[in-house]
Amino acid sequence: MKLKSILAPAFALAVSIAAFAGPATAQGGGPLVTGEWLEKNLNDPKLRIIEVSVEPGLYERGHIPGAQNVVWTTDLVDKLERDIAKPESFQALVKKLGINDDSTVVLYGDNNNWFAAWGAWVFDVYGVKNVKLLDGGRKKWEADKRPYDTKAASVQSGNVKISAANTKLRARLADVVEASKSKNAVIVDIRSPDEYSGKIFAPPGSQELSVRAGHVPGAINVAWGKAVAEDGTFKSKEDLKKLYAEAGIDGSKPIITYCRIGERSSHTWFLLTKILGYDVKNYDGSWTEYGNSVGLPVVNTAGTVWGVK
Amino acid sequence: MTQHDVIPEARLSSPGEQLKTPGIDPASLPFQWQRPHIAVAGAVLVALAVGAYVLHGQGHAAPALSLVFGAVFGVVLQRSRFCFFCMFREWYDDGDPRGLFGLLVALATGIVGYTLIFGAWLPDATTGRLPPDAFIGPVSVALIAAGLAFGAGMALSGSCVSAHLYRLGEGSPTAPFALLGTVGGFMLGFATWNDIYLSTISGAPVIWLPRWLGYAGALLAAIALLTLIAWALSRTSRPIDSPSTPARDLPEALLTKRWPAWIGGAIIGMLGTFAYFRVAPLGVTAEIGNRARQAASTLGVAPSRLEGLDTLRGCISVVGDVLLSRNGAFVLALVAASFAAALAAGQFTPAWPSRGQIVRGLIGGLMLGWGAMTGLGCTVGTLLSGIMAGALSGWVFAAVVFAGIAITLSVGRRAGLLPRPS
């Protein structure tokens, strides 16, 4: 008994030291949670785990125990207009997901958490608090050989009330045009260098095209993938700070992120906002809106012309 | 031309004729004459197992499982001669319903298995959502035309796509041409797809029976329908005049004798369930479709954009550029394992094709390919996996495929183009 009473606090101390020594961005209290933390807290009744994956059937054939499935194409966007989910349908969704005022929501998914990050952005736009990402998503969870489950989770309806959409987190076309002209905000293009230069209109396999290739004048290209380590987790806060500072993005000015349809840029939006604490808007219209707009300036260093090569 | 030359595939599967080489004592066949064959067969299966083991060890669980599922499917198809055309023809010509009973058992087993999975994945069937990547397709005039063409292709070429694949492993002289024809038929299907899709498929209803009847209702309705079909079949069957001698021992029963169709059916029903649970529903045309689409776009014979195809359930032709897709692994393992099973049974008998076999294989294959493309799958995908998944499209396809066989056999025989049963 005595030994136990001595060892228990010592163990707790060791754990807390180890926790502080680890990557500063991946704790239960921060914007990210680690697989280790999540696995330990799976039975926490206040935890709501949500998978947002692109590949159909992935969630059903194995998901983190207790996780619920959200389909980004029907749950997180409006099915008719090009817009994020309307307040009524999003309110119904969070109610169905059992999210309460005191819930902690952990999102994760395939494809490096792209759509989970999109989800985190939509949750934030509607003012749902305590929304985190599982660092590394499915990829890291699997690499760590953590377990999956195939049962659909059932939860009691939640009581959280969403707020009006927060326009400070979302850039519209006019904001981007204004920022491009007046330089009152830094625009970050997170697509691949070939999309940025205009060599290609869209990544291979993407149907949604723009009629012009290139980027918004003044936009800085930092491909989203630079922010993640080999295992899919975010780099450390210091490395991220350095990465963006070297590109001229230090948080001194508001930031606008964009990509092709707004999902990869949510990934960068998440880290710049939640990990680095900068003031960032995600431009979900992205290149498929800007690159199709009539009469807006475009920088195309590759010289591609629509329909001719 | 003897009848054996004309349509050997169908004849070989008749119940009294379980071996391709008459005159050799079946019991001694695999163990004395065929020892080297057994060794080669074993080596093929071991190679598949090693392939799966290595893939799994490298973290590719789904392709590894696809190899295993494909191998099991190949062995079961070959050993129980699970060939949709032969099953139908045995009943149609000889009044022997045992093959079709095997199909009914496969469907019943699979429906139960799928229902168990659906209940866990989608506890409420009425939400408007469909279960992920199940073969639930639109029910349209195009589906009916596709089924009729597919049935006619089966009657002409002597089997469906899956049976041609396992017969490839038996050294069938027709199968290579039928499969070649199938690739051509897919290209034809791509060429006609956009018009057919826009005029008939895009507005057609996608009907998932559990959404309307609930899981219990859909399960009971399906089992009741299968029972009714079984009853009708047993009413029309004739006494079977060539009862096969029972196997002497287990190795002979497993390796040489044709497995009872209902055992094959039960295994396929379970395999379908497991495959859907872990990787994807059973289907043998996705990879053929992919390759055909690549070839078609290289040759410039198919439109570069196939309207709506990438959004359809049970979609068979999303272009994949990986060297070995999951379905590719499944199909390769199927052919290799059926080759091993045929070899061990003394049923690997490669033969030079006759001109008739080449022509019927190519033309029949063309119709199989067009039907599989337009119907978004074949007798394994749209019919078997579709019915298991509670898709109305599966039932409709099944009805018209068998109608297509009956019409083609009847008309073809009357016109003297297809052989009459002996």
Image: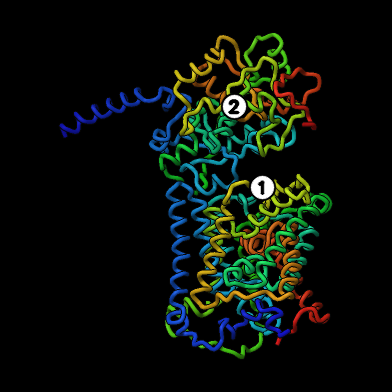
**Tally of numbered tags:** 2
Answer above or below: position of B413 versus B264: below
Q: Have a look at marks 1 and 2 and say if they share a chain.
A: no
> Would you identify the image quadrant in which residue A4 lies?
top left
Q: Chain of mark 2?
A: A
The x and y percentages for residue B357 are: 71, 74
x and y percentages locating residue B322 in the rendered image: 59, 47
Q: Secondary structure at mark 2?
A: helix
Left or right? Give the position of A276 relative to B374: left
- Between A232 and B207, the one nearer to me in the picture: A232
Residue A5 versus residue A179: which sits nearer the camera? A179
Q: Image quadrant for the N terminus of chain B?
A: bottom right
Q: Return the residue at label 1.
A: B319
Residue depicted at 54% across the width and 20% down the height: A272
**Rendered location of residue B123, percent (x, y):** 57, 50
Judged left or right of residue B37, residue B357 is: right
Residue B171 coordinates in the image, percent (x, y):
59, 72
| Observer able to see residue B236 | no
Of the numbered discs in the image, which one, if any, rests on residue A266? 2
Q: Report how far apart the C-alphas of labels 1 and 2 lie in the structure.
A: 28 Å
